[in-house]
Amino acid sequence: MKIVEVRHPLIQHKLGLMRRAGVSTKDFRELATEVAALLTYEATKDLETAEETIEGWAGPLRVHRIKGKKITIVPILRAGLGMLPGVLDMIPSAKVSVVGVQRDEDTLQPVAYYEKLSGRMDQRIALIVDPMLATAGTLIAAVDMLKAAGCTRIKGLFLVAAPEGLARVEAAHPDIEIYTASIDQRLNEHGYILPGLGDAGDKIFGTKQLSPND
Ligand SMILES: O=P(O)(O)OC[C@H]1O[C@H](OP(=O)(O)OP(=O)(O)O)[C@H](O)[C@@H]1O
Ligand SMILES: O=c1cc[nH]c(=O)[nH]1
Ligand SMILES: [Mg+2]
């Protein structure tokens, strides 16, 4: 399986800011957007282009245009929505296919509850976006849904991934590609990534008190 840990200085710097205890919802959201855009840049490096002739200001010239399969961005509800603006900044015309999968916090099992995919998934490259790849139950469930809809080209973009989860994805879906800003150390006994980011969904949506004054 292709796994790319994107160790670009801008990404590493921004991820470092996101890891601070007490990071504000506003900062976390903005940084998630920025890192998502940078991961998109890396994950789309291999898109096919074709040359075409256009009329430029000084006459006709050859330019490149993206060709081949069109992209659909697949944010996994809820936290994946925090990365969607950054990906759309880079690919503004992409269709968006929304998938809802929530991890049961007691069993850590994924619970799929929503699916609204764009048409002709067999003709699209799916870019799954989710801040966290922990046990990988969520990602595997999302990939199962996309493959059932005919999708054959799938890439996943994550802010942080755990080695245990990456091994599980490799066993279940070795044909997909993973792009992450960091492969962290391990999962704790509650399935949280260490050092990780804490609960990314809560940080993006501001649903957990960070301090008594928040
Ligand atoms: O790899 P896994 O062990 O499956 O865990 C990762 C999932 O957990 C988080 O979502 P969560 O279920 O907390 O939902 P949320 O987006 O509503 O916070 C995260 O955004 C991933 O989707
Ligand atoms: O570390 C983790 C694991 C799952 N979900 C999160 O938000 N964080
Ligand atoms: Mg959550």
Image (tube, grey):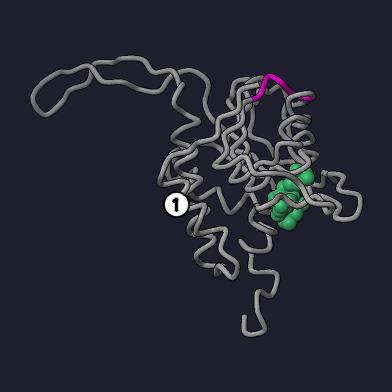
Q: Is residue 34 left or right of residue 188?
A: left
Q: Position of residue 214 (x, y in %)?
A: 62, 80
Please report the residue visible at 61 percent of the width from the left and 52 percent of the height from the top.
81
Q: Is residue 172 left or right of residue 13?
A: right
Please report the residue visible at 60 percent of the width from the left and 29 percent of the height from the top.
155
Q: Position of residue 159 (x, y in %)?
A: 58, 46
Q: Is residue 115 magenta?
A: no
Q: Is residue 178 left or right of residue 116?
A: left
Q: Position of residue 63 (x, y in %)?
A: 26, 20
Q: Which residue occupies the foreground of this view, 70 or 165?
A: 165
**Residue at mark 1:** 13
Task: Identify residue type, mark 1.
Answer: His
Tell me the element at label 1.
helix
Magenta part of the protein: which range? 172-176
Label 1 neighbour load within 10 Å: few <14, some 14-19, many 20+? few
- Does residue 100 appear anywhere in the picture? no
Q: Name the residue at the right extreme.
A: 107
Q: How many tags in the picture?
A: 1
Which secondary structure dominates the residues rendered in magenta? loop
